[in-house]
Amino acid sequence: MAELQQSKGLHWMKKIALELIVLIFVIGFFSQSLLNYTLPRVTSVPVISGQVVKTYQMMGSVEYRDLLHVRLGNPVIIDEFYLEPGRRVSEGDPLFRINPGYPVKMLTQQIAEITSELERERMALDKLAIGQEKDSKGIQLLEMEVRQAEEELETTKILYESGAVSRKHLTDQDREVDRLRIQWEIAQLEAEKQAHNFQIEEKEKRLTIDALENELEQLNRGKTFYAQVDDEGIYHAAMDGLMTYAALTGQILGQDDIAVTIARVNEEMEGLVYRGTLSETDGKQFDFGDLLDVKLEGVAEAIRIKITNLFYDANEDLFRVEGQIMRDIPRQVTIRKQYRGEMVRREQAAMVVPRSALRGGDLRPGEKGSIFLLEKEAGILGDHHTVRETEVTIMNVGDHYISVMGIEGVERPRVVTPITHRVRDGVKVLHGY
């Protein structure tokens, strides 16, 4: 009987203990739920290793890097072209034929006449220099005569004082010294006047010589052009490339007019560059050697370039950039057409977070700011989350993400974003991914 009562007592004790455990769990659950209701709700993203992408608006076009402009150097008329713009040419290919009414002989005669005139002007300039040198030597000779006469006068004075010569002899010699001095002074004044005239005449001669040399250079350039023209008046290409321009036929072309333009590009279209403009602020973000992607409006594939030239144009208040094209251009791109587009900088970084995760600080490399890292602790009723404010240094700034330094020692960090006004350092939060 006693054992039965003891068994019943043990049963009731177990039942009461179980009910107490259930009651504690329920109370704890509702307490935790009530607590969670009062906590700030936050979301977070992992800090990742990835790219920081920044875009800059620009205008530009794909251009030919090296162009050969064939100028004629002498008035001619082109009768016909054998190739049209857009066709590939090889060195020596016939490109066009010149009207025989403009013979090469006329150019040769002009060169001979200008050469003779130039030689005469140079000889006249040399003659001026010789005359100037002669006048200078004459003055030096007179100066020597004056010095010698003065020395002889001093000797005569000593002899006169000792009674060796008469007073008349001394007076005559003194007058001779005065005459030589006056003659020397007159020669000096005349030389100064001659030197002034020489300077004027020399300047006129040099201007004439410069003009003749320029004219001769133009004529020789025309002669070089004609060196590519055979006896039938046909011009042959001077290099391999792509014909991009041809003048009109049947019209007189002067020495500065372009007859043909050839771009130095091969069959793989190597020899193209990208040229564009950036705002003054954006242009300061780049430097020589930067590798960038250029997205052109209406073109699906980006162009990869390496900056080879970058300078500020004060007249336009913008930066001009030129870049070597690093891979084949998309087929949709039209050469020399202006496109609106974006220059895209991509930089790899170890610690990348959304821009919205940063608190305070200017969004510039080198500036300080802070982020809120999410800490997780396991508890009886589930995980507890706390935010910790951590100072970081901004390394790179992109359109949507930034890279930072200062959390390298944190294992698998998660950063709170966006930041609400209830989020502070050390605050417990309700976390939702």
Image (tube, grey):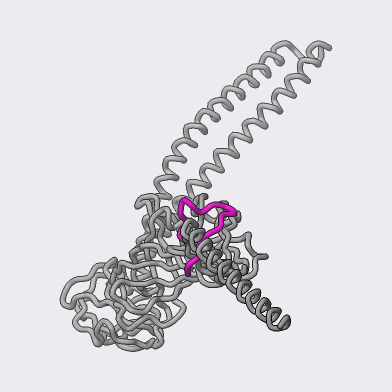
Vertical order, 417 against 125 (above or below): below
Quarter of image, res 111: bottom left
| Residue 74 image point, x, y percent | 28, 70
Q: Residue at x 50, y 68 (%)?
A: 45
Vertical order, 31 against 152 (above or below): below
| Residue 269 image point, x, y percent | 39, 83
In front of the other: 189 or 356: 356
Q: Can you say which quadrant of the picture contains the N terminus?
A: bottom right
Q: Examine the structure image and report whether residue 77 is included in the region drawn in magenta.
A: no
Q: Examine the structure image and report whether residue 418 is included in the region drawn in magenta.
A: yes
In the drawing, does residue 389 fall left or right of residue 63? right
| Residue 9 image point, x, y percent | 67, 76
In the drawing, does residue 81 fall left or right of residue 197? left
Quarter of image, res 153: top right
In the drawing, does residue 422 fall left or right of residue 75? right
| Residue 221 image point, x, y percent | 37, 70
In front of the other: 169 or 137: 137
Vertical order, 136 against 333 (above or below): above
In front of the other: 58 or 422: 422
Quarter of image, res 295: bottom left
Q: Is residue 356 visible?
A: no
Q: Residue at x 52, y 64 (%)?
A: 353
Q: Residue furthest front?
A: 1
In front of the other: 14 or 61: 14
In the drawing, does residue 42 fall left or right of residue 208? right
The secondary structure that most of the magenta stretch takes on is loop
Q: Is residue 220 visible?
A: yes
What residue range appears in magenta? 417-433
Q: Residue at x 48, y 56 (%)?
A: 38
Q: Residue furthest left?
A: 250
